[in-house]
Structure formats: C-alpha cells, structure tokens
Amino acid sequence: MKLYDSIGPNPRVVRMALAEKGMSIDTVTVDLMGAENRQAGYLAKVPTGGLPALELDDGTVIAEITVIAEYLEDLEPNPAIIGTTAAERAETRMWTRRIDLAIAEPMTTSFRAAEGRALFAPRMTLVSGEAAAELKAIAQEKLLWLDKLMQGRTWVCGDRHTLADLLLLAFVEFGTSVGQPLPAAATWLPEWHKRAAARPSATA
C-alpha cells in the first residue's frame, strides 16, 4: 500500500487517520505547488488530480479522504475513527459530511479564488472575487452554527473522537493559516481545538 501525499488539509486528514490507528505505510510526496498532480502520470491514477490517494498492492487507486478513511477502518477496525456500531458509523458519517459541505468546501473554494488565485487559476475554473468573499462569510456562519450545536460535547460525536474531528481540525487550522480564523464569538470551538491539537496524531 502506498500513499500519495502532499501539503494541504486533505492529505493531513489521512495522515492523522493513519496516526490514530498506528498504521505506517509507504509514502510518495507529490509536488502540489509544481502542479505534479496535474500531469499525465498522476492523472492516469487519479483523474480529478486530487490529493491524497491510496494505491493498493494490486494497483487499485482509492481517492477522496473520507473513502480512504473508510478503507483504513475496514483494514484496522480498532481504534475506531468511524464507529463500532451501525449507529456510531452513521453519526460519524453524518457530521463528517456536514463539516465537509458546510465548512471545508466554502473555505477551500474561497481560498482558491482569492489568496490562492494565482496558483489555481491556470488549473481550474474559479468563482469570482465577490463570490469568494461570500463563501468566506458562509464558512464563518457555519462554524458558528456548529459551535452552537456542539455545546456540552467533548468531541463532534460526543465522547467519541472520530473522523469528523480529524476533518474539522485540518480545516480549522488551514482556515487560520489563510486568513479565515475561528469566529471571535465561538466558545466551544476554541476549547475543542485545544483538545484536538493536543492529540499526538495532530502532528502528522
């Protein structure tokens, strides 16, 4: 098994998942800044050009971070980052999807169209600068929405540290690094962040 790794929040989610499970696999670093993931060799493996990707021993390539995490969970069920029961797995998948669509997506789309425009404009179609500002506002709004819903919980899924927390940590810290910090009014998120960032896997 081989992980195609790079900079950015998406590969970090998978690295953290591997760390949480105590798994070590071969890694190939792909030059995202140099657009190596947009070259024919990588596109033959991952048509979207997305990172990371997991290549299995038989040559099968699995992409998309939540799918890779599910595969890792199937290989190594313990410790669970998705769940040990149908109800737990459903809860983790629900919150992971909500965080992905409501926070990660507008945050990254707006970054690409604003601060990252010079890098990404030659590679993909981008929204306008005005739309980027609106998407940043949506991400902030959804962070506050999540903050309110999470009051009284230790982790996104209550007392279970899961893939939803890994995803949220990667994108909260990515957002902070590109001028989209946690909203000043947030109260649960800063305390949650201290807990999440203190886990050994956070350094992956």
Image (cartoon, rainbow, N blue to C red):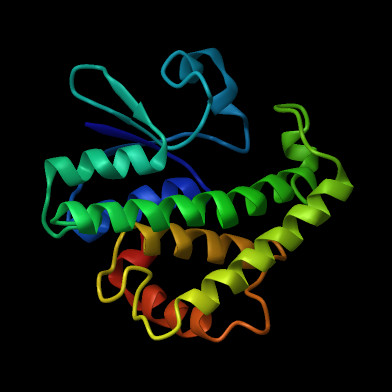
Residue visible at 58% across and 60% down in the picture: 174
Instruction: Give the vertical position of 164 relative to 114 (above or below).
Output: below
Foreground of the two, 72 or 202: 72
Provide residue 56's location: percent of width, then percent of height: 23, 26
Q: Quadrant of the N terminus?
A: top left
| Count of number-bearing discs | 0
Asked whether residue 36 is in view, the answer is: yes
Provide residue 156's location: percent of width, then percent of height: 38, 69
**Going by the image, does 104 lie left or right of 46?**
right
Instruction: Give the vertical position of 72 relative to 46 (above or below).
Output: below
**Quadrant assignment, res 199:** bottom left
**Going by the image, does 185 lie left or right of 171?**
right
Q: Quadrant of the C terminus?
A: bottom left
Asked whether residue 25 is in view, the answer is: no
Instruction: Give the vertical position of 31 relative to 42 (above or below).
Output: below
Q: Residue furthest front?
A: 87
**Quadrant assignment, res 19:** bottom left
Provide residue 110's location: percent of width, then percent of height: 73, 49
Foreground of the two, 36 or 169: 169
Residue visible at 20% across and 47% down in the picture: 24
Foreground of the two, 49 or 151: 151
Residue visible at 66% across and 71% down in the picture: 181
Foreground of the two, 2 or 100: 100
**Going by the image, does 93 lie left or right of 189?**
left
